[in-house]
Image (cartoon, coloured by chain):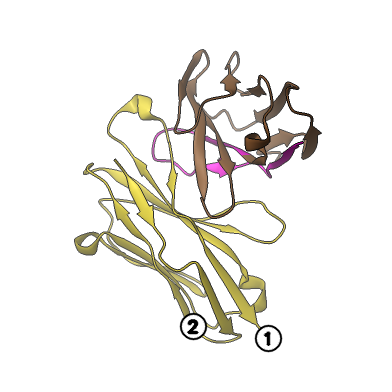
Amino acid sequence: NAGVTQTPKFQVLKTGQSMTLQCAQDMNHEYMSWYRQDPGMGLRLIHYSVGAGITDQGEVPNGYNVSRSTTEDFPLRLLSAAPSQTSVYFCASSYSLGNTIYFGEGSWLTVV
Amino acid sequence: AQKVTQAQTEISVVEKEDVTLDCVYETRDTTYYLFWYKQPPSGELVFLIRRNSFDEQNEISGRYSWNFQKSTSSFNFTITASQVVDSAVYFCALSEAWEETSGSRLTFGEGTQLTVNP
């Protein structure tokens, strides 16, 4: 069982570069989301989606873009990387509202 | 707005001690869900438990137990006879259910670093 798969696991970017963090789930989950984890701040919601074609902003959406063209995939795009976006990124999915939320293994991103 | 507070930033215990991790939450919703996750040093987030607001029964799973009290807005987690492998950061999280389009959005506490020493 693959569950929630994130790639890449580690990435170093230069300021101003763009990149896409990939997230895929094979559990036919409708709900998917992206969080970032920073020291002492827990995890904060960046963007989320309640189904293909539907996305919305979370708590810290600035500098990030998402789309949901299929149920399985929910990529997170950094448009112009900044050092403040150095963080660990987690993708999550769940079948429906209130169900167990499963997380990917995380993507460690450093912007220099 | 929803909020989760884990007042204990770090806890250090000796193996075989019992330890309780506190979680206090705030929400205006009557229907909500509470979660606990474990983050070991390897970094992944491991699901431990989900509880909905209508189920106040305490739960025990092996050495783990959870005490949910709506009267005090708390959802505390106890590890009995702790082991070195329990060393991790533990997160409490809350998901409101005020509308279907809110999805399963989690608000996390800041986490409690538990260190179990041999």
Measured along the vertical axis of the image, is residue B74 above or below residue A52?
A: below
- The residue carrying mark 2 is B18
Q: Which mark is residue B118?
A: 1
Q: Earlier in the sequence, mark 2 or mark 1?
A: 2
Residue drawn 56% across and 83% down?
B13
User: Any magenta on residue A100?
Assistant: yes
Q: Badge 1: how crowded within 10 Å, few (<14), some, or many (20+)?
A: few
Q: Depth check: give the residue in front, A40 or B67.
A: A40
Magenta residue span: A90-112
The N terminus of chain B lies in which quarter of the figure? top left
Callout 1: chain: B
State which chain is coloured yellow: B
Callout 2: chain: B
Q: CA distance from mark 2 to mark 1?
A: 14 Å
| Residue B22 screen position, x and y as percent | 39, 67
User: Any magenta on residue A27?
Assistant: no
| Residue B27 screen position, x and y as percent | 26, 46
Residue drawn 61% across and 24% down?
A74
Q: Is residue B74 left or right of residue B42?
A: left
Q: Badge 2: how crowded within 10 Å, few (<14), some, or many (20+)?
A: some
Q: Is residue A101 left or right of residue A1?
A: left
Q: Quadrant of residue A17?
A: top right
Circle 1: residue type: Pro
Color used for chain A?
brown
Q: Is residue B36 left or right of residue A37?
A: left
Circle 2: residue type: Asp
